[in-house]
Image: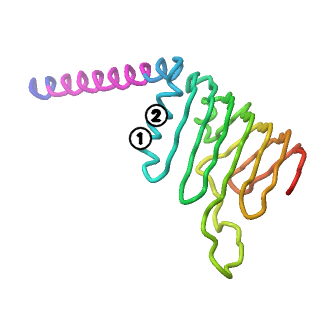
Amino acid sequence: MPALGQALRWSLISLAALLLTVATLAGGFWLWAGSDGSLASSLQFLQHTVLSDQALEARGVTGSLRQGGRIGALNWQQDGLRVQASEIQITWQPSALWQGELHLSQLSVAHLSIQDQRVAVPNAPAAPPAQLGLPFKVDAQVQVGTLVWQGARPAALEQVSFHYIFNSYSHLIEKGYGLFSSN
């Protein structure tokens, strides 16, 4: 019987050490995520690991993962599609992720340029994507100073503002406005 008591004691000590380690790591991550530079570090991580089949470049990044921040320039490209954004300001509520929602109280972009150089498939009718689902709900207040589309039919929008909502079933844009011009 003493061996059983000793095994139980060591099991409890091991469990307590494991819980203490997890709590320490979680606390360290929480502190790091609130520090200036954590947003830049996260974008660098995305550049080098997660998006290996795509090109992502971010410059002039300040702020933290917990509070949001500013990105001077963000460029992304894949398969002939290039997106360039400048003067991005992000404010969000990370605690909403615990409820399965991405809540962006501010996503503003001074200039957004989308260049579509993808090769067109001859005689293929244009069709919407079969699936536009996201892994979480989204609630975002979005403002774009200038949006330029450079493709087969160039167009431009200015002073774009809208409230975007994805509720796990449908995409909704509320209170939207913008000035449209076409070449």
Residue 13 place in picture, x, y as percent: 24, 21
Residue type at mark 1?
A: His
Residue 126 magenta-drawn? no
Residue type at mark 2?
A: Gln
Number of the label disc, if any, that sits on residue 44: 2
Element marked by disc 1: helix
**Does the CB distance between marks 2 and 1 fall below 8 Å?**
yes
The overriding secondary structure of the stretch rendered in magenta is helix
Identify which residue is drawn at 68% across, 36% down: 103
Task: Please tell me how many numbered marks the rendered image carries.
Answer: 2
Residue 10 magenta-drawn? yes
Element marked by disc 2: helix
- Disc 1 target residue: 48
Q: Which residues fall within the magenta stretch?
A: 7-28
Residue 171 place in picture, x, y as percent: 75, 54
| Quadrant of image for the C terminus | bottom right
How many residues crowd mark 1 within 10 Å: few (<14), some (14–19), many (20+)? Answer: few
